[in-house]
Image: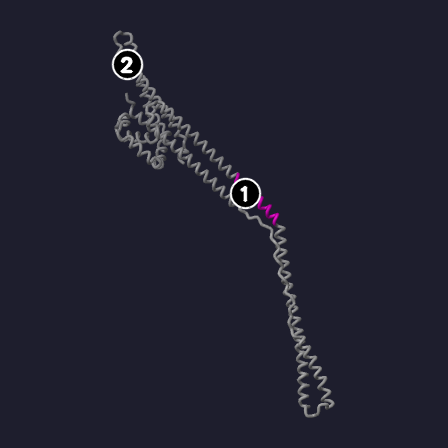
Amino acid sequence: MDINRDALLLYLRDLRDMEMAKYQIGKMIRQAEADYRSDDAQLQGELQRAQQISDPGYWILPPKEKEKEYAWSGSTGLYIMGIIIGIMMLAVIVPCISFGLLGTSILPFLFILVIACGAIVFFCIARIITEASQERKYREELEKTNAQIRARNWEKENRVRQHNAEVPELQQKNALIRAENKKKYGQLRTENQKKWDERKQFLEDEKKKVQGILDKAYSENILPAPYRSLAPLYYIYDYMATSRESFEDTLMHEHLENGFQRILARLDTIVNNQAEEIFTLHRMEAQNTVIIAQNEAMLDELEQIDVSIRDSSRQINATLGDIRDNTYQTAQYAQQTSQYAQQASQYAGIAATYSAVNAYFSWADYLKN
């Protein structure tokens, strides 16, 4: 006996949607883990960069700049020698002219020598005075230059001393900054870990709920075990919903395995493109009391029909059991009774699955993300 086609399609759709929800939750867990690891790696990188603070080292006193040495190279000595020689010559020539010791013939020459010696003496005196002034200026410039050198040396030494005095404080400050950074990013990583743990636990709990609904639905043994996954369910439901093939003929279809493989090869694409639409439609139905009432009434009616037939078969079987030579008919009615009882139980299971799936989609808003 075949299960009612509408009931079967409702059942297969519920299984497909729950398998797709399970698949989507698995993707969400993997994406959440990838996001967590990416955020954690980013936080570690930021901490590493924040900790790259250069500690100041102690400076070594630079070599002092040498002061300029006195290096005046004037000709004062020569000019003094020229003055002495000129005076000595005057001391000889002047008496000779005064007392006429050398005669009158060379007087003009002697007068010229006197004038020349006097000029030399005056020139040397003038040069000595000039050089004395120049030397004084040289000494002043030398002292000024050396004062600047001493000031620069003091400034360098003072800067080194100030820096070295600040080094311990700066190192301590950097140590505090590193400690604060470590604490700050440690807290951020802990919060990120907690967020991931909570998200992972929530999604894994939801996945267990979905698997529980699927396990209960599969326990009706309407769908053979090899087809209890997303790819086969997607293909079987789509094939039956768009054709008039029976469930048995669909499972025996020669292209069934190829269809599974095609779906499996592009399963990610199918889920990415259709999951949101499928979930939205099911969420809308889960909130539509009219459609729910219609489907529940259909399933309840099918169950009651099979129950009635089962009860009638039991009565007939009991009557035949009292009559001799009716062993064959009794066995036939007993088999029918068992089949109708099983089918009634399957309709009840389909109805229970329908209710559980609607309850799930009525609040599973996290699938939107």
Which sits earlier in the primary sequence, circle 1 or circle 2? Answer: 1
| Residue 365 quadrant | top left
Instruction: Give the camera-side residue of 166 and 5.
Output: 166
Looking at the image, residue 22 sits to the left or right of residue 319; the answer is right
Q: Position of residue 20 (x, y in %)?
A: 36, 32
Residue that badge 1 annotates: 181
Above or below for 128 versus 306: below
Q: Position of residue 276 (x, y in %)?
A: 36, 35
User: What's the residue at 29%, 7% (across, down)?
Assistant: 322
User: What's the residue at 53%, 45% (across, down)?
Assistant: 51
Looking at the image, residue 100 sits to the left or right of residue 356; the answer is right
Amino acid type at circle 1 is Asn
Look at the image and say whether residue 169 sits in the magenta stretch. Answer: yes
Instruction: Give the camera-side residue of 40 and 79.
Output: 79
Look at the image and say whether residue 255 sits in the magenta stretch. Answer: no
SS for callout 1 = helix
